[in-house]
Image (cartoon, rainbow, N blue to C red):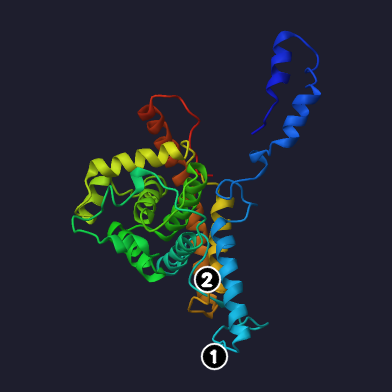
Amino acid sequence: MLFCNFSFLLCLSCGHSRPTRPSRTARASRIQEPDLALEPNPSDHPRASTIFLSKSQTAVRQKRKSNHLNHVSPGQLTKKYNSCSTIFLDDSIVRQPNLRTTLKRMTLAIYYHIKNRAADRSLDIFDERLHPLTREKIPEEYFEHDPEHEFIYRFVYTLFSAALLTADCAVVTLVYLERLLTYAEIDICPTNWKRIVLGAILLASRLWDDDAVRDVEYSQILKDVTVEDMNEMERHVLELLHFNINVPFSVYAKYYFDLRSLAHDNNLNVLFSPLTKQRARNYEAISRLCDDEYKDVCRAAMRRSFSADHFIGIRRSNAILS
């Protein structure tokens, strides 16, 4: 997309050959005020570092420093290294990640978002105290402590397994989550993390998964949540994202590989096995199949974006997953 100076376009429409030079005061004010547009959003630009990886690196460095000062042994080395004759791989590839492994990594990223948050900024629509996900009374102490990684994983895994969502949907969920936190200028904390994650999953599953789960089916998974509540939350998420639901494959790939780096830095156990000829043939077949499926997803996303535009009532640019 090409961005043009508005004053230059105005001059062209009036017949002038060049735009008017801004005054010295205007130039000085531009220098004094920081240009936020110069800071790319990680969920939009493939070269910007993901927020969750930046938040996790501080904790990883502190843990390594503490282990070094306290002479803590790293334990038995279980990582396998490649050689000239043997290549070790896990069963995840960027086109078809492993579900459990990806969810472990994605929920660890959410854990670091909560643990290393700057503040507790939130919105009422995401506050679980105002919009509980269960009819059971939740003690106030529940909202005073950060959830553990395993607790977050169980919550997300229950949704993904019940709704039959795929692993690539988990990566897109994390993209939408970081985009939402940045656009809306809020923090994910103990009072809102479940509803923020649920809203991102709703949007990702509807736009990314071929067999999108409807809100009615989610209400059967979450028995105490009404369809109207889910529709309202999804509508708020779309508005807070400024209806920017485009996820370029370059951004998707960046999040996928940053999640792998996160798992490596935090010693998440992943099963590696030698690459055999049969596995290589299977990966090649999966790659060809995913290429065909990805083209179908792009066409389906374009059709869904047209329907979303009619629902909004305002003509907007089409949302294309490229």
Q: Which mark is residue 50?
A: none
Q: Determine whether, in the image, residue 77 is placed left or right of residue 17.
A: left
Q: Determine whether, in the image, residue 44 is placed left or right of residue 205.
A: right
Mark 2 Cα within 10 Å, few/some/many (few <14, many 20+)?
many
Q: Residue at x 43, y 58 (%)?
A: 170
Q: Earlier along the polypeptide chain: callout 2 or callout 1?
A: 1
> Which image quarter holds the C terminus?
top right
Residue in the foreground of this view, choosing between 162 and 110: 110
Residue 183 screen position, x and y as percent = 51, 42
Number of numbered tags placed on the structure image: 2
Residue in the foreground of this view, choosing between 17 and 294: 17
Residue 216 screen position, x and y as percent = 23, 46
Q: Amino acid at mark 1?
A: Gln
Q: Secondary structure at mark 1?
A: loop
Alpha carbon separation for disc pair 2 and 1: 17 Å
Residue 161 in sight in this render: no
Residue 224 in sight in this render: yes
**Residue 5 versus residue 60 in the image, above or below:** above
Residue pointed to by mark 1: 76
Residue pointed to by mark 2: 263
Q: Residue at x 24, y 60 (%)?
A: 138
Residue 12 screen position, x and y as percent = 73, 14
Asked whether the residues under the numbered discs 2 and 1 touch, taking CB atoms below 8 Å apart as contact, a structural biologist would say no
